[in-house]
Amino acid sequence: MDTWLIIVIVVVAVVVLALLAWAATRGRERRIESKRTEAGELRQEAQSRVQRADERQALAEEQAERARRERLEAESRLERADDVDPDTDR
């Protein structure tokens, strides 16, 4: 085999290996970027859910407070009714 042919084969092999290494690196970078994007989307969704949950919790607490006040008012009226009713022993 001629020397120039061996040199050409070696150069082609080196170029092919370099291209394969570059392609592997590029693919890895794409996967990493894809995972970063997915993580960002998951974070946004989680933050939205947390916000909605906080809003629902605040509403539930407000409704519980309203129910507590209504119960106190109803109990107060029951006491007043017992005071007014001549058939009770109060």
Image: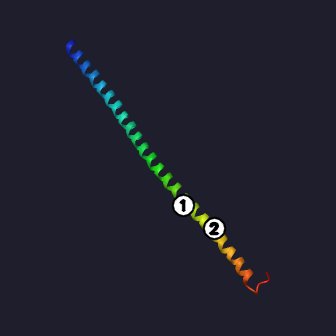
How crowded is the residue under tag 1: few (<14 C-alpha within 10 Å), some, or many (20+)? few
Q: Which mark is residue 51?
A: none
Q: Position of residue 69 (x, y in %)?
A: 63, 67
Q: Position of residue 63 (x, y in %)?
A: 57, 65
* 25 over 80 or under it: above or below: above
Q: What residue type is disc 1 on?
A: Leu
Tag 2: amino acid: Arg
Q: Are marks 2 and 1 in contact (CB under 8 Å)?
A: no
Residue at left offset 48%, top offset 53%:
49
The foreground one among 57 and 85 is 85
Q: Which residue occupies the foreground of this view, 32 or 21?
A: 32
* SS state under label 1: helix
Instruction: Say which quadrant the N terminus sits in.
Output: top left
- What's the residue at 24%, 15% (across, down)? 7
Extreme residue toward the bottom, this view: 87
The answer to whether residue 34 is left or right of residue 81 is: left
**Vertical placement of 4 versus 77: above or below?**
above
For residue 24, which quarter of the picture?
top left
Give the residue displayed 73% in from the left and 83% down from the top: 84
Task: Find disc 2 in the rendering and name its residue.
Answer: 69
Q: 42 left or right of 12? A: right
Query: Could you tell me how far apart the alpha carbons at marks 2 and 1 are, in whole angstroms?
Result: 15 Å
Is 26 drawn above or below residue 53 in the view shown?
Answer: above
Left-right relation of 34 to 5: right
